[in-house]
Amino acid sequence: MAKTAIITGGSRGLGAAMAKKLGEMGFNVVLAYHSASSEKLTEEVAAEIEKFGVETLIVRADVSKFEDCEKLVKATIDRFGDRISVLVNNAGITNNCNWIDITPDQYERVIATNLMSFMHMTHLVLPYMISHSSKDDQCNIVNISSVGGLTGVINQADYCASKAGVIGMSRALALEYAGKGIRVNCIAPGMIMTDMLRGVNQDELNALAATIPEGYIGGVHDIADAMEYLLKANYVTGQVLSPNGGFVMQ
C-alpha cells in the first residue's frame, strides 16, 4: 500500500517538481493550493503524478489559516487514512518591498504564509506521524526555507525573517522528535529557474547567473532531488540542505 505525502503550494514551480518526485517515489500525494486561478495547474500536476500509478487528492486551502490546515489534514485522512508519512511545507509568498513603505498587513501576511503555515501543518500532522513512526519506518517533515534565511536580501526583510524562522523551528523539532522516528530537515534553495525568473530579461538573467560561482541558475529538479535525498537519508535530521551553486556557502 502506498504511503501518503502532503505538500503545500504544490501547483507550480518548486512545489510541482517536488510533488511529481513524491509520486515517482511511490507516495499518494495530497496537493494543497490557494487561489482559484491555480486549480487547473494543480489538476495538471495531479495528472502527471498519477502516471506513476499512485493516487492524488487536491485540496484548496489557505494554509496561513489554522482552520484551513485542519480542513486539509482531515481531507487527507478521510481519503487515505491517518498514516501520513511525509509533510512538505512549501507554501510561500514575498512582498519585495523596502521596510519604510511596507505595511503591517503585508509583512504579517508573509509571516503567516511562510512560517505560521509550517507551524500549523506540523502541529496537526505530528500526532499521526508519532502514532506509527519507528526507527525502521521513519516519517519525514521537509520544510522549504531559502538562502534568504541564511543571509540578508535587500527589500526582503520579512521574507528573510520567515525563512530564518523556518530553519530554527526545524532544528528544534528535529531534536525534539529524533527519538520517535521522525526526521525534520530544511531545503534552502538559491536562485532557481521558476516563472518569476523567466519573466526577467536576458541581460538581467545573465547578470544573476554571473553572481553564482557555478555560473548558472538551478532548475526545479535540483530541489526535487534534494527532497528525495532527505527522504531517503535515514541518518540525517536537523539539517539545512542548500542547492545554490555556491552562492551561499555554510
Image (tube, grey):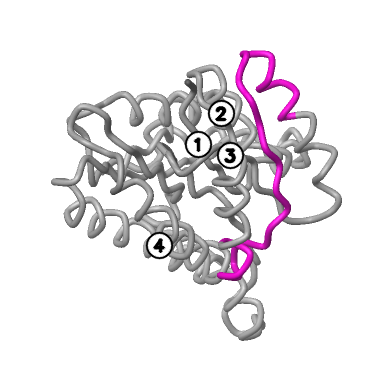
Q: Position of residue 1 (x, y in %)?
A: 47, 20
Residue 80 as seen in the image, left or right of residue 50: left
Residue 38 as seen in the image, left or right of residue 71: right
Q: Position of residue 90 (x, y in %)?
A: 53, 48
Q: Which residues are magenta?
A: 45-69
User: Which residue lies at the image location 46% right of the left edge and 47% below the top edge?
Assistant: 144
Q: CA distance from mark 4 to mark 3?
A: 38 Å
- Determine which of the numbered discs, if any, sits on residue 5 in the image: 1
Q: CA distance from mark 1 to mark 2?
A: 6 Å
Q: CA distance from mark 2 to mark 4?
A: 21 Å
Residue 50: in magenta span: yes
Figure quadrant of residue 104: bottom right
Q: Residues within 10 Å of mark 4 (few under 14, many from 20)?
A: few
> Residue at the top extreme?
52
User: Which residue lies at the image location 40% right of the left edge and 57% below the top edge?
Assistant: 149
Residue under pointer 4: 123
Q: Residues within 10 Å of mark 2 (few under 14, many from 20)?
A: many
Q: Residues within 10 Å of mark 3 (few under 14, many from 20)?
A: some
Mark 2: amino acid = Asn
Residue under pointer 3: 208
Residue 205: in magenta span: no
Residue under pointer 2: 28
Count of numbered tags? 4
Mark 1: amino acid = Ala
Q: Are marks 1 and 2 in contact (CB under 8 Å)?
A: yes
Task: Please tell me whether residue 244 is drawn above or below residue 8 in the rendered image.
Answer: above
User: Which residue lies at the image location 54% right of the left edge and 17% below the top edge?
Assistant: 24
Q: Are marks 4 and 1 in contact (CB under 8 Å)?
A: no
Marks 4 and 3, the one that precedes in the sequence: 4
Name the quadrant of the C terminus. Answer: top left
Marks 1 and 3, the one that precedes in the sequence: 1
